[in-house]
Structure formats: structure tokens, C-alpha cells
Image (cartoon, grey):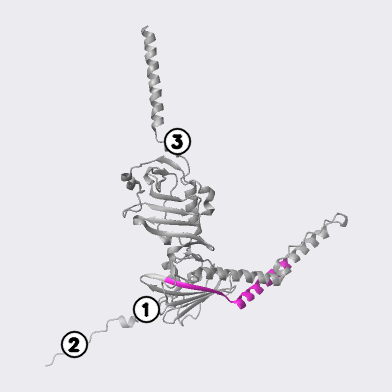
Amino acid sequence: MKTKTLYILAAVAVLALVVAVIMNRSSAPQSDVTEQAKPLLPGLKEHVNDVSGITLIGAGNKTLLTLRRDKDGWVIAEKSNYPVDMTKVREFLLKLSQAKLLEQKTSNPKRYAELGVDEVKDNDAKGVLVDIAGLPQPSKLIIGNYNGGGGGGTFVRRDGDAQSWLANENLTVAKNASDWEKRDLADIAASRLRSASLTSADGKTLNVYKDQPSDANFKIADLPKGREASSEFAANNLGSVLANLRADDVAAAKDVPLADKPNKAQYATFDGVHVDATLWQKDNKDYAQFTASLDTDAANADIARAQAKAKADYDAAIAAAKKTDDAKSAETKPETAEAKPAEPPKPLAVSDPAKDRQERLDALNGEVAALNKTFAGWTFTLPTFKYADMTKSMDDMLKPLETKKPDAKDTKTAPKASPKPASK
């Protein structure tokens, strides 16, 4: 009986343990089961292309940034509708659409600040409220601190929900308009540039140039008599200034007007594209405005050179193919002769020079139009090193003048005069 009683007591204990586990699970928050591992913003992934705006709101309900999509693309409202860097918008929306809920965090408002998900109406709020427009249902999300010391992820809270979460992406959002701006202004390789002419505010001019696109270095025009360039590479930075030209910031031209006596810079490519810059400094910032144009005469001359080269290359290819064919024919018996090889394909510059010319001109005009679309109506803040290369002077290009050494005879101590004999 004692053994039977022992078994019964053990069974009762196991049953009590099972019941306790079941009760504990049933009393756990339902969100652990229904929400965990689900998308942070349901529906965003399926409708990401429908997003028409992103508004960032910070402490004190202050609107930090308004990004919106118009007919020409995304713009920044606070920057007079300056274009957005679309790469950054796509990356941000992609992260939000892929983010999933990893772990349930506090639902106590007194602890929101620890995670950075406190209400943005508070003046000392740390998080950012992201309001996404254009979706079937409103999507507002408070993005808090990055969980850098705890394995990654970002603390978040859906607007209006008490529950906060750890999401699996780094959703840290840039709060400044300048972080979202389109920074790329131009990318004209130094190999295309024929000349650069820099004119200072006092009217002095520095000209550098290449004779051929293949020249390794830019030359300095009108070197002062008796002076030398500091090196054979001295002017190369001036010729590469339009390569990967990016702005640090931008403002509407009306908000940052020209200085009274600005510097000027003019750049001309071998194929006729011209870029003119007006430059000045104010409040320790380096400003510039740009315009672009096409020199049709230069463009046509360059096209003519390109077509002549294409024709010469094609004729040389035909001659080489014929020579090879003749050599093979001489070595092969007539009855075993193979079919002649096909002629090299004829380039458009040879088969239809007029069409080729028009296509090249259309491409150049398209490039100029794209540049002016970027430039028109804006004042750009340039990186210091780019501004410096656009405002160089002739003195910056030259070797320093040698200090004349005094003649050796001038440095010798003059002999002392012999003392006069004493008077008697």
C-alpha cells in the first residue's frame, strides 16, 4: 500500500506541475504569441511603392522634416522642394518594410524614455515619430534608441500603442534635411576637360588646358617670365574639379544671394559642354552657383574628329581582314577553300554619319539639360577642397621665388684700418 500511495502522490505532483505550466502560458500576454516575429508595419511591404510622404516629428511635436513625392520625384519641403537622395529614401522604406518584432518591452509610460520611445509631445522626448502617408491604413511609428549594446535592433513603439518592442533592424533615422538631400552635382571626368579658366574677384585670371584628351597633365597658360610651375602635375586638380562634384548643403538661390564681387570659374570639355561657376565665401562657408551650356561648334568639331577616327579604324579593320583572307587563300587549294569571313560590323559613324551626329548631339544636349535641372535656382555649399581648387591663382601654381644669396665678397669682414701712430 505504501508503494501504491507513493505512486499516487507522484502522479498528483506531476499533474499539478502541468496545470501550473498551462495556467502560466494562458496568463501570458497574447502579443507574445500573436505579434512576435510579425512585421513591424503590416502592409508596408506590399504597398511600399504607394508611399507618398514621410514626415519626421521630434520633441515638442516639432516637425523636423517633410519628404513628399511629387510629379518629378521626391523633394524636401523644408528645403524649398529640393530633390531628395532617392537611395536614402529607398533604403529607409526597405528597412521599415522588412523589420520584424523580436521582443516585447515595457508598456509602462514612465520607462519609455529609457528606450527612447516616449511621446514626442514632450519637450525632452528622445525618439522620432515617423508618419508614413499613402498607405491603405495610417502608419505612425516612434523610433527610439538603437540597441547597440544588446545585440542590435531598434526600440520602437507604434503610435497609440502602450506596448514597446525591440525590432530587428537598425532603424535609426536621420533628423536633418541635409542628410536627405541629393548631393551629386556633376561628374565630368578630367579626360573630357579641355580647359579651365579661373578669375578672381580682383580680375586676375588663371588658365589651364590640354591639347588632347589623352594628355596626362594639364598645362598652365601664360606663365610669368622667369617662373616655373611647382610641378608637372600642379594644374591637374583644377582639371578634375567637376569629377564627382558633390555639395555639402543647398539652399534656394534667393535665400543665399550672390556676393558683390565673386570669383568665376569656366570649364569647357572637348565635346563642347561648358560649366560656369560663380563662387564666394560668407560666414565661413564656401558657396557656388552653376550653369551649363553647349558650344555647338565645339561639339560638331569633336564629332567630326570622332567620326574620322571611326572611319579610319573601320578601314584598317577591313584591310587587315582582307590581308588575312588573301594569305589563307594562297595556302589553301581552290577545291578546299573555305567561305570568306564576314566583314567587321560597320559602326553608325560610318554607315550613317548624319544619324550618328544627331544622336551624339542629342546626348550632349540631354547632359546639359540634366545639369541645369540640378543647378537652376540653387546655391550650393561646397566642400572646402573643391572650393579651393576652383579659386586658385597663378601664384598657387608656381615655384616660390628663390631668395637671392648675398655675394661671398660681401660677407667677408673688411680689414681693419691700421692705427695711426701717436703724435709726438
Give the number of the mark in front: 2 or 1.
1
Left or right, residue 344 beside residue 75: right
Q: Give SS at disc 3.
A: helix
Q: Amino acid at mark 1?
A: Thr
Residue that mark 1 sits on: 403
What range of the chain is rendered magenta? 287-316
Pick whichever of labels 3 and 2 is earlier in the sequence: 3
Q: Position of residue 334 (x, y in %)?
A: 87, 57
| Snapshot quadrant of residue 111 | top left
Residue 419, numbered circle: 2
Residue 33, numbered circle: 3
Q: Residues within 10 Å of mark 2 (few under 14, many from 20)?
A: few
Pick whichever of labels 2 and 1 is earlier in the sequence: 1
Q: Residue at x 52, y 51 (%)?
A: 48
Q: Residue at x 33, y 42 (%)?
A: 108
Q: Compared with residue 415, is residue 160 higher up or lower down, i.e. above or below? A: above
For residue 300, say whether it is visible.
yes
